[in-house]
Amino acid sequence: MTIEFRDVTKQYPDGTVAVDKLNLTVEDGTITVFVGPSGCGKTTSLRMINRMVEPTAGQVLLDGKDVAEGDPALLRRGIGYVIQHAGLFPHRTVLDNIATVPLLSGWDKAKARKRAAELLEIIGLPVELGKRYPAQLSGGQQQRVGVARALAADSPVLLMDEPFSAVDPIVREDLQNELLRLQSQLGKTIVFVTHDIDEAVRLGDKVAVMRVGGKLAQYGTPADVLRHPVDDFVASFVGRDRGYRGLSFLSAEGVEVKELELVEIGAAVSASDGWRLAVNAEKQPRGWLPPNSTVDGSLDEDDLVAGGSLWVRGTPIRGALDAALSSPASLGVVVDEEHRVLGAVVARQVLDVIEGTPQAS
């Protein structure tokens, strides 16, 4: 389902212009990210799609039909909506939270709860959590439930207003990965609001950069925005390190994965003059054992040094370079999709691959 803004303006009674003549088309089955500083009108623009905010002028069209022509309540039931703090009902169980919109749409309770249980699995949460209340969940779990609730009515459009900004960076990355995985399966038309340019370029098929006063500064693919900012405002907003961010669009083909010495948590460990990576029984990384470390008895996590991101093999080269540069051992840990260790990369070799890769103009 396409979403089209035609000369859309929102001006408040005090004269403040939140959105100024916005013209933009969100293509069917894509993620479009609205990004910009506070006060640029990105949330207002999003909320005009489901008529939580009414435009002063112009039209918002869903598949060519003006959203102003229908019943606002009916419109909202057909559009998924995820907000920053999940917005779950504290007195309802997780299952009943997810089932809210299907029940409002006339589904019987058994069918709605069955759908809610299916969605728990789809978003990567155990079905047993369905009996809990929101206060019994972590922040990341609550956000996943918020996404599940937005998906429950199987609407073609999903609106997401800074949904991951209230969680810590590690959980945030997991949620971003989950959204991309879901989108690859479901193909929704998603409008996503964030103030974080890294999140925008990671998630968006298209990025709409907005400036204060509600004007659209630039609209294009993440690569276009990073490599060809239209003016000083966009260049400043995407940052001086936009060249590094641009590595998110380069293949890691040619990066060599080297063998890495592993030790297992709970095992006896002898001395060594090199860094070793500690793993659990599933070969997932738990931390680094520094050179010449002595361990009394079996190895546990208190003996380890934390640090370093993980590079999932097959993903863009930016992750490989970040893993190598952030590692205390100067060895970037390479993992598969289940986070099982495959080996290591070193920064110099990653940089050699980057230097030998033609850059898109």
Image (cartoon, helix red, strand yellow):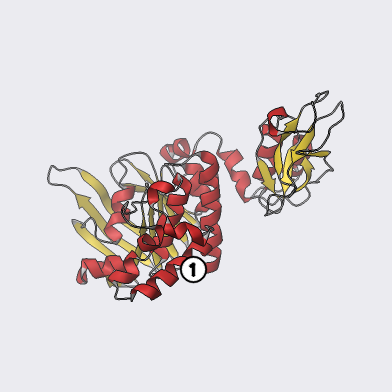
Q: Residue at x 20, y 70 (%)?
A: 71
Residue sitting at x 28%, y 61%: 50
- Where residue 146 sits, quadrant-wise, is bottom left
Q: Residue at x 46, y 42 (%)?
A: 167
> Viewed as shown, does residue 358 lie left or right of 146?
right
Q: Is residue 18 visible?
A: yes
Judge by depth and name the residue closer to the eye, 195 or 18.
Answer: 195
Quadrant where the N terminus is found in the figure: bottom left
Please tell me which residue lies in front, 280 or 214. Answer: 280
Of the pair 20 and 54, the residue shown nearer to us? 54
* In-image side of 70 versus 49 (left or right): left
Whether residue 222 is visible to the viewer of this picture, yes or no, is no
Q: Residue furthest left?
A: 13
**In the image as oriented, which residue stretches furthest toward the front?**
297
Residue at 67% of width from left, 35% of height from top?
A: 308
Q: Which residue corresponds to mark 1?
A: 118
In x, y percent, where is residue 147? 43, 58
Element assignment for label 1: helix
